[in-house]
Image (cartoon, rainbow, N blue to C red):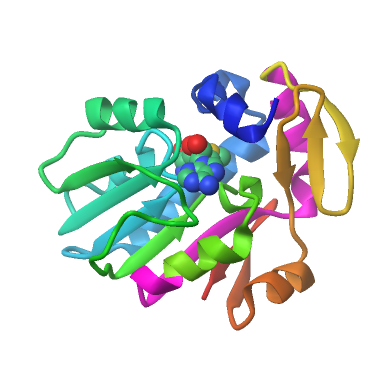
Amino acid sequence: MSNDELYAAGLLNRALDPATQPPQIRAFLQEEVALLSDVIVDGMAMVDVGCGTGRHLAVLRDRLRIGVGVDYEHSYIVEACRTARGPRLHFVTGDATRLPLRRSFDIATCLTNTWGTMSDKPAVLDEMRRLAPMRLVSVYAEASIPARREWYRSLGQVVVDESDESLTTEGGFRSEHFSEKRLRTLVGECTIRPFADIGYLVLF
Ligand SMILES: C[S@@+](CC[C@H](N)C(=O)[O-])C[C@H]1O[C@@H](n2cnc3c(N)ncnc32)[C@H](O)[C@@H]1O
């Protein structure tokens, strides 16, 4: 199966169950939420690319002037509309390489290594640049490999291939990890900060 098919089969819902998450992964997810609470101030407009079921926008719903989440997996958008409700939150089914949006935002985010599961990475960055002057991506570093192996195994996705750039599971899920050098090559001008022991934050 491809990543698209695995997401369509509900992989994200299982991955977000804390019972499946090794401690380093749980810590990474918690630090992301804490970071967003610092970075997003009252009245901002935010677009979250690859928003899944909308958990990050849901946390920020009382602060945002407008929050838009986009994901290509329609069932996640349906779930986001059901659970991440708020008068200023909107969820749209669409591809990150051709975001179906015209308005501009204060910040565009792509969180929890979502960018590391997308195939056309430059196109996603270009879309984020088009929509917002501040862009934030969080990704996994090589140090995440042992925790991700364990996490994916608990999701029934045993890792069968490991390279300098990615893990691939028996079921076909492919998730990348990054070095600072590779991030600079892919993103260009950016600020990179180590994050939660197993990842990086990229501001560009
Ligand atoms: C690792 S999950 C993270 C979801 C969400 N950001 C979160 O942290 O809960 C990656 C998400 O990206 C979505 N996705 C992957 N490729 C995409 C693409 N090309 N366009 C839109 N969404 C995509 C998947 O459907 C999935 O919901």
Q: Identify the residue at horizontal 22%, vertical 65% (top origin).
A: 44
Residue 106 is drawn in which quadrant?
bottom left
Q: Is residue 195 visible?
A: no
At horizontal 56% and vertical 47% (from top left) the residue drawn is 114
**Overall secondary structure of the magenta section:** helix
Is residue 92 something that shows in the picture?
A: yes
Magenta stretch?
Answer: 129-154
On the image, the x and y values in percent for residue 86 come to 15, 39
Q: Is residue 141 magenta?
A: yes
What percent of the width, then of the height, locates residue 8?
52, 25
Q: Is residue 72 above or below residue 183?
A: above
Is 158 on the left-hand or right-hand side of 105? right
Does residue 106 sit above or below 141 in this rendering?
A: below
Above/below status of 165 relative to 59: below
Residue 198, percent from left and from top = 70, 51
Among the 4 quarters of the image, the one containing residue 107 = bottom left
Q: Please state, as top left, top right, bottom left or bottom right, where the N terminus lies in the image.
A: top right
Residue 23 picture quarter:
top right
